[in-house]
Image (spheres, helix red, strand yellow):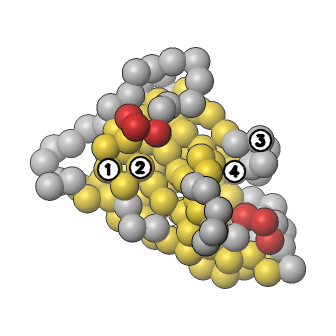
Amino acid sequence: QVLLLESGGGSVQTGGSLTLSCNVSGSNYRSNCMAWFRQVPGKAREGVAAIYSGPGRTYYADSVKGRFTISQDNAKTAVYLQMNSLKPQDTAMYYCAAGGCVVRAAWPEVYEFDYWGQGTQVTVSS
């Protein structure tokens, strides 16, 4: 069984920073793509950042470019999201996902993510 466990969420003021972590455990699973998504109640899930493990290629939502950075550990069993200059509109539940993706010059397809975490809440106050 493969489990994804997020941590690092919390409450910060506008302009603050948080680092989210997601650890993958179980069954010697090795994905080749990982990503962070977020969702606000009543709204569609939004892709925030994604990384293809092999080439280290990263993709970001326009709304977070220049403020968020996605990275992985060397063992490719953890993914991180460094979030700087946080805004109230960044408030959401953040989920990590892992999968076996076709490496392309674009975001991975959502259906390629096999496993999802339970989420960690990020709240940014003005």
Q: What amino acid does circle 3 point to?
A: Asp
Q: Earlier in the sequence, mark 2 or mark 3?
A: 3
Q: Secondary structure at mark 1?
A: strand
Front disc: 1 or 4:
1
Q: Are marks 1 and 2 in contact (CB under 8 Å)?
A: yes
Q: Where is residue 111? Give x, y as percent.
A: 40, 37
Between the residue at mark 2 and the residue at mark 3, the CA separation in whole angstroms equals: 19 Å
Q: Secondary structure at mark 3?
A: loop
* Category of crowding for the residue at label 4, using alpha-carbon neighbours closer than 10 angstroms: few (below 14), some (14–19), many (at least 20): many
Eyeballing the image, is 70 above or below 86? above
- Residue lying at 26% horizontally and 59% vertically, measured from the top left: 3
Residue located beneath label 2 in the image? 97
Q: Where is residue 35? Give x, y as percent.
A: 49, 45
Q: Secondary structure at mark 2?
A: strand
- Residue lying at 67% horizontally and 81% vertically, measured from the top left: 11
Between the residue at mark 3 and the residue at mark 1, the CA separation in whole angstroms equals: 24 Å
Residue located beneath label 4 in the image? 68
Front disc: 2 or 4:
2
* Category of crowding for the residue at label 1, using alpha-carbon neighbours closer than 10 angstroms: few (below 14), some (14–19), many (at least 20): some
Residue farthest along the right direction in this orientation: 126
Which of the numbered marks, if any, corresponds to residue 62? Answer: 3
Q: What amino acid does circle 4 point to?
A: Phe
- Residue lying at 78% horizontally and 48% vertically, measured from the top left: 63
